[in-house]
Image (spheres, grey):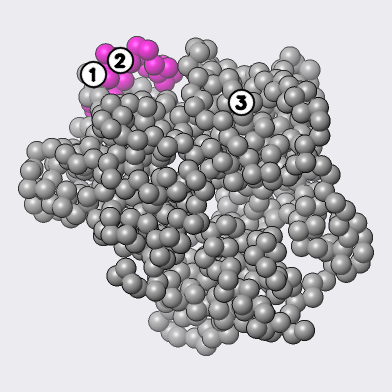
Amino acid sequence: MSRGDPGRARPEQLLDALDPEQRQVAEHLEGPLVVLAGAGTGKTRAMTHRIAYGAATGALDPRHVLALTFTAKAAGEMRSRLRALGAGTVQARTFHSAALRQLRYFWPRFGEGPFPELMAQKAPMVSRAVQAVGIAPERETVRDVAAEIEYAAVSLLGAEEYGERAGGRDLPAGLDAETMVRVIARYGEIKTERRILDFEDVLLVLAGVLGSREEIAAEVHGQYRSFVVDEFQDVSPLQYDLLRRWLGRRDSLCVVGDPAQTIYTFAGASDRFLRRLPVDFPGAREIRLVRNYRSAEPVIGVANAVLARTARSPIRLRGTDRTGPQPAFAEYEDDAAEAEAVAARIASEVSGGRRAGDIAVLFRTNSQSRLFEEALSARGVPYVLRGGERFFARREVKEAIAIMRAASGRGSTERLDEQVRSILSSVGWTPEAPSAQGAVRERWESLTALVNLAQDSQADTTLPVPLSAFIAELDDRAEHQFAPAVDGVTLASVHAAKGLEWESVHLVGASEGLIPIGYAETADEIDEERRLFYVAVTRARTALSLSWSKGRRGASGSGRRASRFVSEVQAGQRAATTRAAAPAARNRTPAPVKCRVCGRLLTARADRNRGRCGTCPAEVDDAVLEAVVHWRAAKAEEARLPVFLVLAMPTVREIAEKRPEGLDELGRVSGIGPLKLEQYGAELLELVRAHRSD
């Protein structure tokens, strides 16, 4: 796309959309750059605008830029934003996806025979290796051994080198360092015998090839000339080694990270590469992003109180005067009472109009989830357990796609959502959630996610969307592991929640022994637990509650006490209240707002924003609704995006209901954030003016 192409924003437009610090990031296009970005400070926005600005000015060729992330979701979001900014040819991938793509491409040049099989799961091979050294392959043992094997690989440690360092690690139960060395060696032999590569091998083999085959390295250097790396505090020695080989002698590198979100050191990740980058790349510039756009002021206050105590706290977050309720703190007699109370509170949020998908329950260990699953199910509140098997790897998803693929050749005049409902109904899907939990519930959630995705794809047109086009979209999502959203309360460990956010977050089990976890004893281990607590808190956009219990189920009053981090937060809040003795304008009680339909005083923030009770009928302007629906379809086709990534249907309806007259009013519509306001604001206001009925 040329600089004069109307599909690409002008350079000055890209800069106008950024705050002062983000603008500095975008304008720094030559030489190494370190961006220290606090939680919720718009780092993805800064990165994508930097790439787009470089492309618009000619300083960067988007075809030669590689943007690296740690999750498929983050890579998918980055690709979507880059397409919207006119830089859709940029490769945005995870480290593993980028490495695997290159390894497959170059394999015929250096490998023998066909490309090796990729290991889907480590457990079977690890189990064989454990058995080979005379250890019973219990599930927990296999899991912990697999984690140690991964740690050794990403730390660039061979079996013997691992043995020299293993003395200082918490090894799997029943195994000493010598036994672990034998297991790692046998695991490597099994892979060689079976011609199998695991996740870490993909990076290791590619790094080896780039280090030994100059002609292949030169070809890679010619293709990728500029690199952007997200979440740089989480890189491992293996990933950093591969990155240096990708770079070669060049220094066109922008890394973005936050030392205060370093929570994977147990798996080999280290923020030392982020901290020492100016040493490895002399002349590197450092820019700090500190304006938190995600969270309400009370949540930011909690986050800063946590940050004040961590050893890695270069950033103090600044809010944007977003109001919200004060964080809630609650203690319960036992775990069951805590689960019941949290589930009741969530049920109240849902009945009050908050989407279940905008709520999360976060905990330190996965074993804590069961009681919350039971309590939510008892109230009929849908939920999804995050951190399990990848969506597109699930058996029921594979079967559903295979059935739809077979049906796509028959042709149909039905709407896409009707076709998908009919096809999935034939394999047992029902519109109502099953009462059963576990595998039955997870299967229903998977199939429902496919139904909802089909409904979103069909929502903007009266013409039936071909089933073949929907399958092509699913294939693309599967390739990039971009799973559809499931509308249910998220239950997740804090580690699994990294990179996500919700309107309302319930951090449960906030007691000593859980967070910080009981086996965290050293100062470094406690500091990592504090950072984990900080990550949990900063997942909340509006509402935050923290709870704990005095004992296990049926063992109330057994001596548990609130986490030391809770005490630190409460002490920080008291100090802040003392400093702010004079009421600040941002803490004033919002002016009363009445429902424009029934006249009742509105108390919920969502109701005040929409100007009516959630239960009162909306007065939708049909002409505006139709105009925005057609406009959305055209925009989606132009950008080659699913329609829901342009505007979700609830957002379209709210625009037709409110008929905003200015950017400020449009910005208060649910689903219209700063980026969409910048991209579409003028067009949407013109549509409303041209088609409104009065």
Residue 239: where, in percent of width, then height? 29, 36
Specify whether residue 55 is painted magenta.
no
Q: In which quarter of the image is the C terminus?
A: bottom right
Q: Name the residue under label 1.
A: 161
Where residue 155 appears, x then y in whole percent?
30, 27
Amino acid under disc 3:
Val
| Residue kind at label 2, given as amino acid type | Arg
Q: What is the secondary structure assignment of the residue under circle 3?
A: helix
Chain part drawn in magenta: 161-187
Numbered disc 2: secondary structure: helix
327 left or right, relative to 223: right
Is residue 408 visible to us here?
yes
Q: Nearer the viewer, residue 660 or 246?
A: 660
Q: Are the residues at dot 1 and dot 2 in contact (C-beta closer than 8 Å)?
A: yes
Residue 306's disc number: 3
Q: Residue 257 carries which label?
A: none
